[in-house]
Image: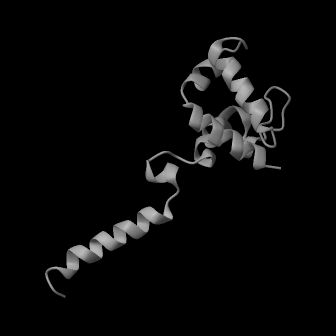
Amino acid sequence: MGALMKPMIGAVLIAVAVAWLTPAQAAGQPSGSAMAHTCAGCHGTQGRLGTVEFVPLAGLPEREFLKAMGDFRSGKRAATLMGHVARGFSDDELKAMARYFATMK
């Protein structure tokens, strides 16, 4: 292989890898699914814990999820932990999680 061919192959491989990633992944932002796993400790894996103490997130409409998280952020909705959790995510990250939970049955 020629000396010029090796760098070109590397550049092509990088370009292909970036093209396969979603814009959020290409920017280094985890998917809604990955971020939603941070909720599993209280709300259960895949948003279902099976107890009445914690709201199930699976199937929750996007609008409801975003309203709740906004209310936690602002302090309008009292909580011991969720205010800190809600402030830890960007608006785009919350939207990605809302979409993920809304698609779950």
Quarter of the image that includes the N terminus: bottom left
- Residue 8: percent from left, percent from top: 25, 75
Q: Residue at x 58, y 37 (%)?
A: 93
- Residue at (74, 32) in percent of width and height: 65
Residue 59's quadrant in the figure? top right
Determine whether, in the image, residue 12 is placed left or right of residue 28: left
Q: Is residue 81 visible?
A: no
Decide which of 5, 69 is in the foreground and name it. Answer: 5
Q: Residue at image x 57%, y 48%?
A: 31
**Above-or-below relation of 103 to 64:** below
* In the foreground, 36 or 24: 24
The percent coordinates of residue 89 (x first, y second) are 55, 30
- Is residue 23 something one can see in this rendering? yes
Give the residue furthest to the bottom: 1
Res 60 → quadrant? top right
Task: Identify which residue, 50 or 16, lies in the foreground.
Answer: 16
Q: Report the side of 20 relative to 76 (left or right).
A: left
Left-right relation of 55 to 94: right
Question: Relative to 102, is 68 above or below?
Answer: above
Number of marks in the image?
Answer: 0
Above or below: residue 67 compared with residue 96: above
Whether residue 17 sits left or right of residue 2 in the image: it is right
What colouring method underlies this structural image? one colour
Q: Residue at image x 50%, y 52%?
A: 23
Q: Quadrant of residue 9?
A: bottom left
User: Residue 37, how many percent across, how many down?
Assistant: 62, 42
Residue ranking furthest to the right:
52
